[in-house]
Amino acid sequence: MANVLRRRMTTISRRQILGMAAGAAAGASWVFALDGKGNVVRAASSEGFTPSVLSADQLDAVAQLCETIIPKTDTPGALDARVHEYIDVRLSGMYEDARRPFLRGLNWLE
């Protein structure tokens, strides 16, 4: 396990680390999607987040669904954790074949 973590950590470039540190210093929070090798394939800031796979209505539906599953109580909920944004970022790193079932299910719910 430690080797896997170490290997994943070493695939992030110095430029990526500096970007993350600059974002953290500026108060921005980030969502990252990694590929199977631990490489960052997409990063999105909370400031001006624009979905790349989901429409604005779909993103809102996913946000509400996630908040229903993990509601805010005395601890943060799914909206606070930006789970809906993570899902869009994660979907953007997938092949169309892998995305299709999720989008089909989302359309079914609507």
Image (spheres, rainbow, N blue to C red):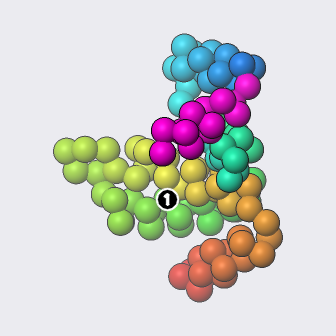
Q: Is residue 34 magenta?
A: no
Q: Position of residue 19 (x, y in %)?
A: 68, 21
Q: Position of residue 85 (x, y in %)?
A: 58, 50
Residue drawn at x 68%, y 60% as measured from the top left: 91
Q: Is residue 9 above or below residue 94?
A: above
**Quarter of the figure with the C terminus:** bottom right
Residue type highlighted by circle 1: Ala
Viewer-side residue, 105 vs 9: 9
- The quarter holding residue 25 reads top right
Q: Which residues are magenta?
A: 1-13
Viewer-side residue, 11 vs 45: 11
Q: How many labels sit on residues?
A: 1
Q: Is residue 48 visible?
A: no
Residue drawn at x 66%, y 30% as measured from the top left: 10
Q: Is residue 7 above or below residue 57?
A: above
Residue farthest to the left, as pictured: 74
> On the image, numbered disc 1 is attached to which residue?
63
Quick one: SS at disc 1?
A: helix
Q: Is residue 6 magenta?
A: yes
Residue farthest to the right, as pictured: 96
Give the dominant element type of the magenta stretch: helix, strand or loop.
Answer: helix
Residue drawn at x 55%, y 39% as measured from the top left: 3
Q: Is residue 96 visible?
A: yes
Assess disc 1: are there few (<14), some (14-19) or many (≥20) residues with their C-alpha within 10 Å of its C-alpha: some
Q: Position of residue 96 (x, y in %)?
A: 80, 70
Q: Is residue 86 above or below residue 110?
A: above
Residue drawn at x 43%, y 45% as measured from the top left: 81
Viewer-side residue, 70 vs 49: 70
Residue farthest to the bottom, as pictured: 108
